[in-house]
Image: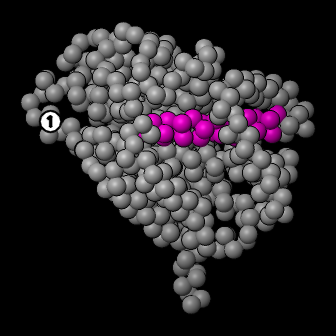
Amino acid sequence: MQRSRSRRHRKVSGISEHSTLELYLHGLGTIIGLGILILPILTIVYYGLLSIYLVIAAGFLALLIGMLIYDISLRHRVDPYSFLKGVLGKEYSFLYGFLLVISFIITTIAAGLASMDELVAFFNLNPYVSLLIVDVIFVIMAVLLFYRVEKKSMNFIGALKIFFVLLLIVVGSLAVYSVGISPYPSAHVGYSFTLSDFGPIGVFSFVLVLFLWMYGGFESIPIVYRGKDRTKVAKALIFSVLSAMLIFFVIQTLVYLVSGYLSMNPHFVASIASMFTANISTLIPGIGIGAPIIIGLSILVILTIAFALMNAGDKVLHDLSSDGILPHFMVKSEGYKLLFTALIPIIVISAIGFLTASSSSESLLYISTIAISALVYVTTFFFLGVGYGVGAYKSRDAVRVAFSVITSLILIALILTFPPGFLVGLAIILIIALAGYILVK
């Protein structure tokens, strides 16, 4: 028995020692997913050419946040959670960790709902069959995490997603060549989810926050790494954000160039994979056979986001339980952590999928789910920015204080101008975080 425990300990310890390339694959593998497949079409309708600039602007915001984590990794040799605990105490770091986990869980739910929607729309599957497929895949991912094979799995997922986006860029370029350049002619569409009701500032904040959320995933790099060489984290983090900026710019541009051929459904936002393949069907003989493969890969790309977020959420819960904020038995058992990061999303997806399976008017529900996740995500890094500023102030570092103030002001401005309904949801989550902390203490 003792020998078995030793083997287990060595195995768990070895998982933490990622190389820079593995961390890069993990970061990029987490970034590429639901956002880039769904958001370009949704935003092109409202902002047209400007949406390309918004993608770049969101990338620079992600880079600002990345620089905070980069500096924490190099100067303090810890992850953001540990840094905040050292600067402002366990209560503040709990808030950061809790919001991060909540954002991960909500995004995981959105990925499940979006995948179910894509299976129904493209493959004409029964909604209940689609729900069953999604649930089975989620269970498989949870089993892989339980048996601690996340490192190899994330290496594969990262490589798969890089291959997929390169394939998507090739298919998008062929779509432009096939149909010619035709930007979307109008800034109006009959969605049941009407962004125009938010007002011009609300729409702008909504879109920019969603694009910033689309870059989300780089923050998981310092979470999953448990080694001592934090320079690996810093390099992988910056490289993953810069790579994502280039990829998202190219894809958003391709979507804009062929957006005039969009066939908009008032109750469904198709992924750009189905949009691109539809536009090259007349150019390449036999593309009709390849289209389902590309669409299937896009659904797999969306679903594997859940695996990456379950893995990152697992590590955050480990930190919270190690600090005595959550029950300590969660440190010892992988299964207990998976109850939060895997079982809760499966239950919520199953409940929502079952209740809305016969209602097409609810198929855009995952867009609202993405929006609240994005708002929580931005709020999480607002708290990180404030904590970073406090740490810099204690060190009498005026330059870093100024950097923190600029980053935090931009993030709080986006939060406060977000559509009011979502702010109510954020307030409820913050109240739950406070109540949860009081209860566990």
The answer to whether residue 69 is above or below residue 3 is above
User: Relative to the observer, which residue lies in front, 174 or 437?
Assistant: 437
The answer to whether residue 365 is above or below residue 354 is above
**Can see residue 93?**
no
**Which of the colour schemes (rainbow, by chain, secondary structure, one colour) is used?**
one colour
Residue 145 percent coordinates (x, y): 49, 64
Q: Residue at x 57, y 35 (%)?
A: 371
The answer to whether residue 427 is above or below residue 208 is below
Q: Residue at x 36, y 13 (%)?
A: 184
Residue designated by label 1: 288
Count of residue discs: 1
Residue type at mark 1 is Gly
User: Relative to the observer, which residue lies in front, 14 or 332?
Assistant: 332
Residue 166 percent coordinates (x, y): 32, 34
Q: What range of the chain is rendered magenta?
A: 363-389
- Quadrant of the rendering where the C terminus is positioned: bottom right
Residue 233: image quadrant is top right
Q: Is residue 378 one of those drawn in magenta?
A: yes
Residue 64 percent coordinates (x, y): 66, 29
Horizontally, residue 349 falls left or right of residue 341, namely left
Residue 34: image quadrant is top left
